[in-house]
Image (tube, grey):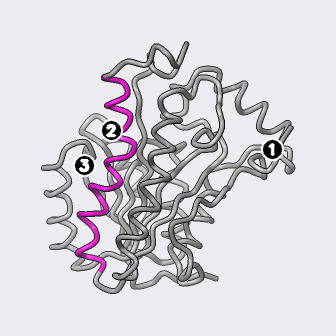
């Protein structure tokens, strides 16, 4: 059993019980980690806080990762409360719904900018905030998807963002390795999260994955949480800059 007692994790991206962030938070909590769980805004606070309350010892914090001042305020609060951090989970992605449907050719400039800012730059921003608190090294992880590599209908601008995210993981890993901070991505299969519902034909995507994947089913957020737990632990101490697939094997199939 993995033991994270004495470790502190900050988890970004909790929206509701379907969130991948929730599956990860549950697994880290089961392993004994102290959790700081972040939700985006006041509107999401009630549902997020009701989940946070299910994890004794966990605390909730509001942080819009597209706002540098909120990020700065958050990490000052985390420093005051915990002194150090060991684990950072970035489970944040967003693109305007209009840019996740129709022709990729018609992607708007503002939609592109928003997708890259919220889904990619935010990883740099929160890692920069966390790194000074990772005084004993640490593990940073984010969430990607196979569309970073191959064309997935309707994923559109978010696919470009995921490609950028995976490249960002590699550059952060190279930059932070001397501090013993590891940075990795989990490429999860499709899950019915709040963010995923914005993708056109999500139901068809889920059916296709279950049909073609070697395990002939879809992944759930607790399985993603299990991989996050591994990456948070010393069992993955020599792994950094990687993209780990948790998709029931879908990515290995050519046809």
* Residue at 53% across, 79% down: 233
In three-dimensional space, the C-alpha distance between marks 3 and 2, rounded to whole angstroms, equals 11 Å
Viewport quadrant of the C terminus: top right
Asked if 20 appears above or below 208 in the picture, the reply is below
* Residue at 34% across, 81% down: 179
Q: Secondary structure at mark 2?
A: helix
* Residue at 78% across, 32% down: 208
Q: Secondary structure at mark 3?
A: loop
> What residue would you read off at disc 2?
44
> What residue would you read off at disc 3?
63
From the top left corner, tell me how far across and down residue 140 is, in percent. Answer: 42, 66
Residue 98 located left or right of residue 223: left
From the top left corner, tell me how far across and down residue 207 is, in percent. Answer: 78, 31
* Residue at 56% across, 70% down: 229
Asked if 23 appears above or below 211 in the picture, the reply is below
Q: Please tell me whether mark 2 or mark 1 is closer to you in this view.
A: 1
Q: Secondary structure at mark 1?
A: loop
In three-dimensional space, the C-alpha distance between marks 2 and 1, rounded to whole angstroms, equals 31 Å
From the top left corner, tell me how far across and down residue 90 is, in percent. Answer: 41, 55
Check disc 2: other Cα within 10 Å, few if <14, some if 14-19, many if 20+. Answer: some
Magenta: predominant secondary structure element? Answer: helix
Q: Are marks 3 and 2 in contact (CB under 8 Å)?
A: no
User: Sequence-wise, which precedes: disc 2 or disc 1?
Assistant: 2
Is 143 colored magenta in this rendering? Answer: no
> What residue would you read off at disc 1?
217
Residue 130 located left or right of residue 151: left
From the top left corner, tell me how far across and down residue 182 is, in percent. Answer: 45, 73
Range of the magenta residues? 110-134
Q: Are marks 2 and 1 in contact (CB under 8 Å)?
A: no
Confirm whether residue 149 shows in the render: yes
């Amino acid at each position: 059993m993995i033991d994270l007692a004495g470790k502190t994790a900050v988890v970004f991206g909790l929206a509701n019980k379907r969130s991948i962030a929730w599956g990860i938070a549950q697994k880290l909590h089961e392993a004994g980690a102290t959790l700081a769980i972040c939700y985006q805004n006041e509107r999401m606070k009630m549902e997020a806080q009701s989940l946070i309350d299910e994890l004794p010892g966990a605390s909730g914090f509001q942080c819009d990762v597209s706002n540098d001042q909120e990020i700065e305020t958050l990490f000052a609060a985390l420093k005051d409360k915990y002194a150090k951090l060991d684990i950072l989970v970035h489970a944040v992605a967003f693109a305007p719904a209009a840019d996740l449907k129709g022709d990729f050719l018609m992607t708007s400039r503002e939609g592109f900018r928003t997708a890259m800012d919220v889904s990619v730059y935010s990883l740099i921003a929160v890692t920069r905030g966390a790194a000074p608190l990772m005084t004993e090294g640490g593990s940073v992880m984010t969430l990607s998807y196979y569309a970073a590599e191959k064309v997935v209908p309707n994923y559109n601008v978010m696919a470009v963002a995921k490609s950028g995210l995976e490249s960002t993981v590699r550059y952060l890993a190279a930059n932070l390795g001397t501090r013993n901070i590891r940075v990795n991505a989990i490429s999860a299969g499709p899950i019915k999260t709040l963010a995923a519902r914005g993708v056109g034909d999500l139901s068809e995507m889920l059916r296709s994955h279950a049909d073609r994947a070697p395990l002939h089913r879809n992944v759930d957020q607790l399985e993603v949480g299990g991989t996050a737990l591994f990456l948070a632990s010393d069992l993955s101490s020599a792994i950094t800059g990687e993209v780990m697939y948790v998709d029931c094997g879908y990515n290995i199939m050519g046809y």
